[in-house]
Structures are given as structure tokens and as C-alpha cells.
Image (cartoon, rainbow, N blue to C red):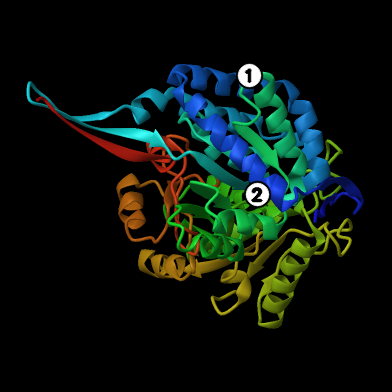
Amino acid sequence: MTKILQCVSPIDGSVYLERETLAPGAAFSAVARARAAQSDWAARPLQERVDLCLKAVAEVGQTVDRMAIELAHQMGRPVRYGGEFGGFEERALYMGKIAASSLESLVVEESSNFRRLIKREPHGVIFVVAPWNYPYLIAVNALVPGLIAGNAVILKHATQTLQVGERLAEAFHKVGIPEDVFQNVYLDHETTIELIRNRQFDFINFTGSVGGGKKMEQAAAGTFVPVATELGGKDPGYVRADANLDAAVDTLIDGAMFNSGQCCCGIERIYVHESLFEAFVEKSVALVKSYRLGNPLLKETTLGPMANVRFAKEVREQVTEALQEGATAHIPTFAEDDGGAYVTPQILTNVNHQMRVMRDETFGPVVGIMSVKDDDEAIQLMNDSDFGLTASIWTQDTDAAEALGARIQTGTVFMNRCDYLDPGLCWTGCKDTGRGASLSVLGYQALTRPKSYHLKQA
């Protein structure tokens, strides 16, 4: 039995688009077609696969204006930011550039008696479950290197951004990537679980909630199919006494508020050395008060609605609870705050780690700021979290930042930067953020498996 998926636009609550899910039989058939097509795709020369994927990326780049408008309708990001093509292209180009070196064989011995080597082999059919908050940017992390490595890819996009999967399929098929090799599918949760339980995929890449990640791992239990998960975070920023205050304010607050706070590696907690605390809060409040909350289709809007009313409800509940427990709110309610998807951005002080707003993932335009007396207190608070995706340190001392980074339980350490994915570095996390590795040479290792050759002369 099929179901209807609805993308409800956060702009006005109207149904933006609907799609019918695949019936279980059709879903199993789609995977079978991908498996049948994968070996021929993997047999093509590596450079041919790279070239086709990069042509597809360029094709996506022909529709940037459309991308921005469609994203505004689907998940509320203002059109002034122009979609996601810049980062989408940056990651794809880098992964194309390093493909040959990342996938080359490791020769252990080449002698008159033996040839011993380790090759990288594609998993086969990989399943990519992409989220709505950065629907192009996050999908590309596994889609492009997965195809380059010789896998077939089945993409299931979030209901909130169904159109993105369609646009990616259009572009990739237009340049000649076979339709069975890359398929965009519409699946309900039950069919998804059945596919996984029945070992239809050889690798699973999931980005989403902790609850969703648990369901993926539970479904795959006993199949021995690897499951890579990126499940968000509660990312901290630490402003040391020697930090460039203005730069720290501008970057950390943007990292907390951009995309209405709906960023996996967005800043949700800030710890500021006591000598800078009051000035940091004052400048941060002034910056947030300058934001323009409103319709994302208007150029003057700097902060759009959250992607869904239920996400906004969770944000408001966390803020309300914090205020009841003694926190101080610094931003008066914006006139455009409708009690629904349009949420007033908020800065909270007098917060502590007993409050949910400093402990649970908020995923909205809210940040709590605390004063700390030294590095040790900052590290203790930064590590006091169930998540570990990124951490941002603000200082003039590179050695100190690296030393502090060694003590932080996180996947990425930033110095004087935040909320960014460097495609040359591994994107990974720890604790409830999940496990996995995307981008960089390690991304190719995750999307392939090693195969050893021990060849002895007779």
C-alpha cells in the first residue's frame, strides 16, 4: 500500500508538493535494478566516473536561482543567501580531485616472488538518507564520492525537501549517469526498514536525529551492513581572554542563528572568559536585534521561518523552560513572530547545564551564553554533553587551541571559525552525534571496502 508524502511550506503552511511512496514490491525492484547496473558502472574508468559526476554538479549550477527559491518554499531559508551551490560545488570538486590518489592500490610488495597489494572496492549499492536542513550540501557528501568510487546510489530525501532529490536526479541523469545507477526514491518508514532488514543495501549513510539513527542501526542489526550516522550536536564555542572580540561575536552568533539555527554544526552553547563576558553579550544582543525576520522570498529578510511548526514548538518550549528556571532573555519578541514557524531569535544568559536549552539539541535560533574563569572550566562545560560534532575556540594562540582541542570530546576542532565543513578534512563525530566518516580521503575509505591480493609466482 502506498502513502502520500507532503511537503508543507513553512512560509504559509500550505502544501508545497506531494509525492506517492513506492509500494514495497516496487522499492525492492528499484534496488534490484541498481544492483544489476552497478557492476557495469564500476567497470568504467575512474576518470570517466569523475568527469560525469562533475558535469552533473555543473548542471546543478545552472539552476542556482531556482534552487534558492525552491529551498525557501520547502524549508524557509531566505533567497538572499542564494541556495547551496557554493559549498555543494566545493565539496564535489575536491572529492573529484583526490579520487585517484584516495582509491589507488596500496602495494605492499612488488618482487620477483610476490605481488601483494590492497585495493579499494565499492560496497555495491549504497543507501543515502539525506536531511532537509542543508539538502544539497549534505547529500553531496556521499552521493558524489559514492558514485565516483563505483557504487550505485539510492537516495531517499527528507519529506521537507522532496524536490531536492528530484533536482539532483534530473541533473545527474541529464549528463549521462545511468538512471538505475542513481535513483531518487520516495519511501515510507516501514518500507525503508524492510529494505534494510532484508539486506538490500551494502552501506547506509544516514543524517538525521538520534532517534532516526537508532532505528537505522536496529534495522541493520545482524545484517553486518555498515551504518554511518551523523546525528547532529550541541556544538560549543569558547572565547578565551585573548580572543578578537568582534570577530568572535560576528562569527559565533552567525553560527548560532544562520538558517534559523537549523545547522548540524551550528553553535548552541557559548562560553566566554569572564573578562570579555559582558562586552560579548552586549555586542551579540545588538547584532541579533538587527535581524529581519520574515518571508524568505523577500530580499530584505535575513532570518526566515523554521522549517516546520513542530520544530519551532520545541524551540519555544526550551526557552520557556529556561526562563522559568531563572534564565534571562535579551531579545524582545519580534513583531513578525507568529507563534508558529516564525520564531524570535534569542540570546539567553544566567543559564546552566541543568536546563534543557544547554543540554538537548535545540536546532533553532537560540543560544545560551555562560561566563567561565579559565580554560579548565570551559573544557569541563564543553565536554558536559551527550553530543560531539564540532567545537570552536577563539584565541590568538594556535598552540593553545590545539592543546585544548586534544581535550575536547568532538569530531572537529575549529580555531577562530565555526559552522563549516572543510572537504579536505574528515567530517565525523562522537557520542550521540554518531559514527562515520565523510569527505576527505577517509570518506572514500568509508564508501569502499579493502580487498587484499596475495599473488605468488609459481
Quadrant holding the N terminus = bottom right
Q: What x and y, as percent, mark residue 263?
A: 62, 51
Q: Which of 69 and 17 is in front in this view?
A: 17
In the rendered view, does 66 fall on the left or right side of 214?
right
Query: Residue at point 43% right, 67% down?
Result: 383
In the rendered view, does 416 fall on the left or right side of 296?
left
Query: Residue at point 63% right, 20% down?
Result: 58
Q: Quadrant of residue 450?
A: top left
Label 2 belongs to which residue? Answer: 131
The kind of residue on which mark 2 rests is: Pro
| Tags 1 and 2 touching, CB below 8 Å | no
Q: Which of 225 and 326 is in front in this view?
A: 225
Label 1, label 2: how far apart the Cα atoms are: 26 Å
Q: Callout 1: helix, strand or loop?
A: loop
Quadrant holding the C terminus = top left
Q: What x and y, as percent, mark residue 218?
A: 53, 65
For marks 1 and 2, give the one nearer the viewer. Answer: 1
Q: Crowding near pointer 2: few (<14 within 10 Å), some, many (20+)?
A: many
In the rendered view, does 420 fall on the left or right side of 454?
right
Does label 1 or label 2 sit earlier along the sequence? 2
Q: Which of the numbered marks, if any, corresponds to residue 176?
A: 1
> Residue 266, relative to residue 58: is it above or below?
below
Residue found farthest to the bottom: 325
Q: Crowding near pointer 1: few (<14 within 10 Å), some, many (20+)?
A: few
> Residue 21, relative to residue 32: is it above or below?
below
